[in-house]
Image (tube, helix red, strand yellow):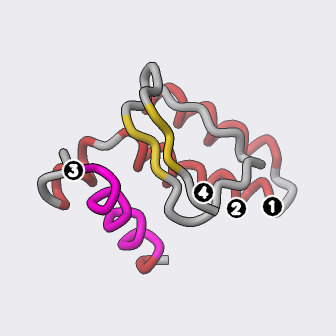
Amino acid sequence: MFETLKDDIQNIFAKDPAAKNTLEVVLCYAGLHAVWFHRIADWFYRKKMYTIARIISHISRHITDIEIHPGAKIGRRFFIDHGMGVVRSIFYI
């Protein structure tokens, strides 16, 4: 689990030249927060706890302004830059 979180953070440094330090990335990147919420929601979705998954997704949307359906398959190294009015999405499967 911690390896995935670390990989998510390192992915941002690889894809976003504006990222300055880990604290900034962890506290200020809504795309990262949306991905982390999605990973939690997806776990519940795969366990067929659809309502809990959708509630988590709904809460995430209100916090991050980014909506990712809990059943979406986003894979590793998914990156959302500028979540409100998405400027670009870079994803690798």
Q: Measuring 16% from the left and 56% from the top, which residue is drawn there?
A: 23
On residue 17, which mark appears?
A: 3
**Cβ atoms at labels 1 and 2 below 8 Å apart:** yes
Q: Measuring 52% from the left and 31% from the top, which residue is drawn there?
A: 66
Does 5 appear in magenta?
yes
Q: Residues within 10 Å of mark 1 (few under 14, many from 20)?
A: few
**Cβ atoms at labels 4 and 2 below 8 Å apart:** yes
Which residue is identified by label 2?
Answer: 43
Residue 82 picture location, percent across and down: 37, 31
Which residue is identified by label 4?
Answer: 40
Amino acid marked by disc 3: Pro
Please, which residue is most extreme toward the top here? 85
Amino acid marked by disc 4: Ile
Is label 4 in a helix, a strand or a loop?
Answer: helix
Comparing 13 with 54, the one in front is 13
Say which quarter of the image contains residue 83: top left
Which mark is nearer the camera, 1 or 3? 3
User: In this rendering, is residue 55 above or below 76?
Assistant: above
Which mark is nearer the camera, 4 or 3? 3
Say which quarter of the image contains residue 9: bottom left
Is label 2 in a helix, a strand or a loop?
Answer: helix
Residue numbers of the magenta segment: 4-16
Which residue is identified by label 1?
Answer: 46
Is label 1 in a helix, a strand or a loop?
Answer: helix
Work out whether mark 1 precedes mark 3 in sequence or the reverse, and give the earlier one.
3
Amino acid marked by disc 2: Trp
Which mark is nearer the camera, 2 or 3? 3
